[in-house]
């Protein structure tokens, strides 16, 4: 069982546990239960981490990263009232939210439960230190990736019969995530003027991975494209016809493995689809840096990050060359 699948199974188990508690003893749903669940997540992944260490397995980062990801996944499933990975014979959570909304006290208890599903400040500090050390260690001996050549190859993928190859092409040429391409994102004409041809620009909406309860989420961004917008829009439409999905979670569950196999076969030098976000940013830095931004600032803007952060730095550990032979002005 893969690490990701192992994590999903544990999250599903904890969602089921929460359902049982909230059904039998709804008054227990509150801040104390949130802290107890957080501690159970922490102890579970610490145990797995310790076992891996005894087997001599190397971990890139602390187990707290798995805790953080799983808590986020658990919170989303409980909040949405969905349990997609449970068997069809299990009761669903549709009645849970209705019961919690019957009176203000229960609603407050559920909100307090969600607020306390988190790492403690000291654990967050340790996790941030570990992430920075990991980024620092991986920022030397970087592989060199052929910039212009890969852009040309990925443009050709837009007309391939396989939807997975078309998806790879769009990911390379737009820097978008798989779920955004298949499910959530729209590509509209730009509203600003650019010194490069406007057919290589778009205004996007439907950006994934925004913070829950953000009072000011990113609704739109104007970004460059490494192929003409009309070609991208046409290709995205065909991909969605061939790879239907009703949610971000469904995209990852249904198509993640097939896309990874296609990447290993046709783009082994890139590694996985998400790596194209790094590639895209570095190509854009060469061709579309209209305001003479620093590389981290340009990466944050074009990838859909709200601000400059440590996370942006993880997208810059590529070397992309040669560049300069492509024309985006005509």
Image (cartoon, grey):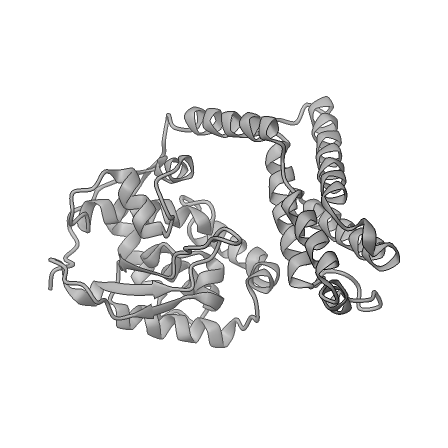
- Residue 255 appears in which quarter of the rendering? bottom right
- Residue 57 appears in which quarter of the rendering? top right
Q: Say if 86 sits above or below 71 in the image.
A: below
Which quarter of the figure is the C terminus placed in? bottom left
Is residue 161 visible in the rendered image? The answer is: yes
Q: Say if 25 sits above or below 298 in the image.
A: below
Left or right of 205? Residue 225 is left
Q: Say if 56 sits above or below 311 in the image.
A: above
Q: Residue at x 19, y 51 (%)?
A: 288
Taking depth in this image into account, of 8 and 153 the one nearest to the observer is 8
Which quarter of the figure is the N terminus placed in? top right
**In x, y percent, where is residue 132?**
46, 27
**In x, y percent, where is residue 151?**
28, 54
Q: Can you name the residue that lies furthest to the right here?
A: 24
Report the label total: 0
Left or right of 215? Residue 231 is left
**In x, y percent, where is residue 208?**
47, 57
Q: Residue at x 58, y 30 (%)?
A: 121
**In x, y percent, where is residue 251?**
56, 63
Taking depth in this image into account, of 322 and 204 the one nearest to the observer is 204
Q: Residue at x 69, y 63 (%)?
A: 81
Left or right of 123? Residue 267 is left
Taking depth in this image into account, of 158 and 91 the one nearest to the observer is 91
Taking depth in this image into account, of 76 and 294 the one nearest to the observer is 76
Is residue 1 visible in the rendered image? The answer is: no
């Amino acid at each position: 069982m893969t690490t990701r699948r192992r994590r999903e199974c544990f999250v599903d188990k904890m969602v089921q546990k929460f359902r049982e508690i909230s059904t039998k003893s709804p008054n227990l749903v509150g801040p104390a239960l949130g802290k107890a669940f957080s501690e159970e997540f922490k102890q579970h992944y610490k145990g797995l981490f310790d076992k891996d260490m005894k087997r001599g397995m190397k971990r890139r980062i602390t187990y707290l990263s798995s805790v953080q990801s799983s808590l986020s996944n658990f919170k989303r499933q409980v909040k949405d009232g969905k349990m997609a990975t449970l068997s069809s014979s299990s009761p669903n959570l549709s009645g849970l939210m209705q019961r919690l909304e019957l009176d203000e006290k229960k609603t407050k208890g559920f909100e307090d439960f969600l607020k306390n599903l988190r790492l403690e400040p000291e654990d967050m500090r340790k996790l941030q230190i570990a992430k920075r050390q990991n980024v620092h260690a991986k920022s030397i001996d970087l592989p060199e990736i052929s910039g212009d050549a890969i852009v040309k190859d990925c443009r050709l993928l837009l007309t391939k019969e396989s939807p997975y190859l078309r998806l790879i092409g769009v990911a390379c040429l737009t820097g978008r995530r798989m779920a955004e391409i298949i499910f959530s994102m729209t590509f509209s004409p730009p509203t600003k003027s650019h010194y490069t041809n406007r057919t290589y620009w778009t205004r996007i909406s439907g950006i994934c991975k925004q913070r829950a309860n953000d009072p000011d989420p990113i609704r739109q961004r104007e970004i460059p494209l490494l192929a003409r917008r009309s070609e991208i829009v046409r290709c995205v439409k065909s991909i969605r016809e061939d790879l239907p999905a009703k949610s971000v979670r469904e995209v990852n569950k249904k198509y993640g493995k097939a896309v990874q196999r296609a990447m290993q076969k046709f783009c082994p030098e890139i590694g996985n689809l998400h790596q194209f976000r790094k590639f895209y940013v570095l190509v854009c830095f060469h061709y579309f840096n209209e305001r003479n931004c620093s590389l981290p600032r340009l990466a944050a803007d074009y990838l859909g990050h709200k601000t400059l952060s440590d996370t942006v730095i993880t997208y810059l550990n590529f070397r992309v060359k040669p560049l300069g032979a492509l024309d985006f002005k005509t």
